[in-house]
Image (cartoon, rainbow, N blue to C red):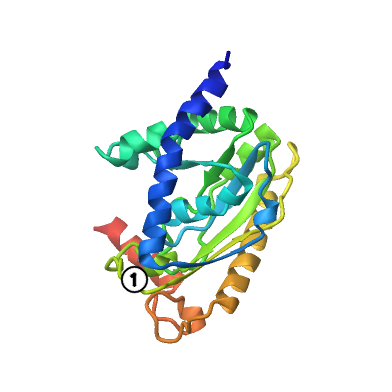
Amino acid sequence: MLSLPEAARSMAEIVYTPVIALVKTLWKYLGLEFTIEGEANIPRSGAAIMAINHVGYLDFAIAGTAALPADRFVRFMAKREIFDHPVAGPLMRGMKHISVDRSNGAPSFSTALKALRAGEIIGVFPEATISKSFELKDMKSGVIRLAQESGAPILPTIVWGSQRIWTKGLPRNFSRAKTPIAISVGKPIRVERDSAIEGSLEILRHHMSELLSNAQNDYPDSPIGQRWAPARLGGTAPTPEMVELESQKRKEI
């Protein structure tokens, strides 16, 4: 007889499996051309925390694709509003993804911790929201605290190219454009329980920045003059400073 955690995991996989089939069909329809590096860093068993940058609305599904060769399903932490959607909500709950209430993060932290202690892989977006500049933003400390409490390693993970399909403030592009998509999973980072949170967060940021820079440098399409590319690379996306200024203006209204 299955234990309660095993039964819950089994039920989640019943929902997860057909959703993956649908996602793979979508990727095929869009003609996405995937390049995945570091997939061997994803453990075939045991807990891990995927810390993923956030440039587009499909990042969770794309990052989850990298775990499939290891025969692993990722349980993502996602904002509560997605779970309130009449279609997406039941699917998210069925796959045992974790609802995050940004005004009260304690329940979602506890749920994620339980999943990690049960040997699951949890997907976290430390930046919390999509980066309009397509550069790494400031990161929240929750990912470090999860690693400290659970003992699970952090897998720095980068997605690049997804912003060309669907991102904040730009029209969706579901044309069959054979868009290159890069996913890079770095080597596991262990965080000691007594490590300084800010220092550990800076180490994670360094690894993610390095992976992002490599993905951008190796990307086959030129960023020059492209709205999906950071200003630093010759693209026309707003700089981090411009995004911050816009945010401050909105707060003043």
Q: Is residue 25 above or below residue 85?
A: below
Q: Quadrant of residue 47?
A: top right
Q: Can residue 115 be seen in this view?
A: yes
Q: Which residue is drawn at 59% across and 78% down?
A: 217
Q: Is mark 1 on a helix, strand or loop?
A: loop
Identify the residue shown where x is 39% and y is 70%: 164
Q: Where is residue 15 in the image (x, y as percent from the top left)?
A: 41, 35
Q: Is residue 195 above or below residue 186?
A: above
Near-viewer residue (126 or 180): 180
**Quarter of the image holding residue 113?**
top right
Which residue is at 54% across, 77% downward? 219
Q: Pinpoint residue 74: horizontal percent, then vertical percent.
A: 53, 42
Quadrant of the rendering where the C terminus is positioned: bottom left
Q: Residues within 10 Å of mark 1 (few under 14, many from 20)?
A: few
- In the picture, measured across the screen, residue 219 lies left or right of residue 172, that is right
Q: Position of residue 189 (x, y in %)?
A: 72, 50
Q: Say which residue label 1 marks.
A: 176
Q: Which of 1 and 242 is in front in this view?
A: 1
Give 31 or 228, whichever is nearer the viewer: 31
Q: In which quarter of the image is residue 6?
A: top right
Q: Which amino acid does label 1 sit on?
A: Arg
Q: Quadrant of the N terminus?
A: top right
x%, y% of residue 41? 69, 52
Residue at position x 51%, y 27% in the image: 10
The answer to whether residue 129 of the structure is visible from this angle is: no
What residue occupies the far top of the structure in this picture?
Answer: 1
Tell me: residue 58, above or below residue 3.
Answer: below
Which one is nearer the viewer's eye here, 58 or 130? 58
Q: How many labels does the image show?
A: 1
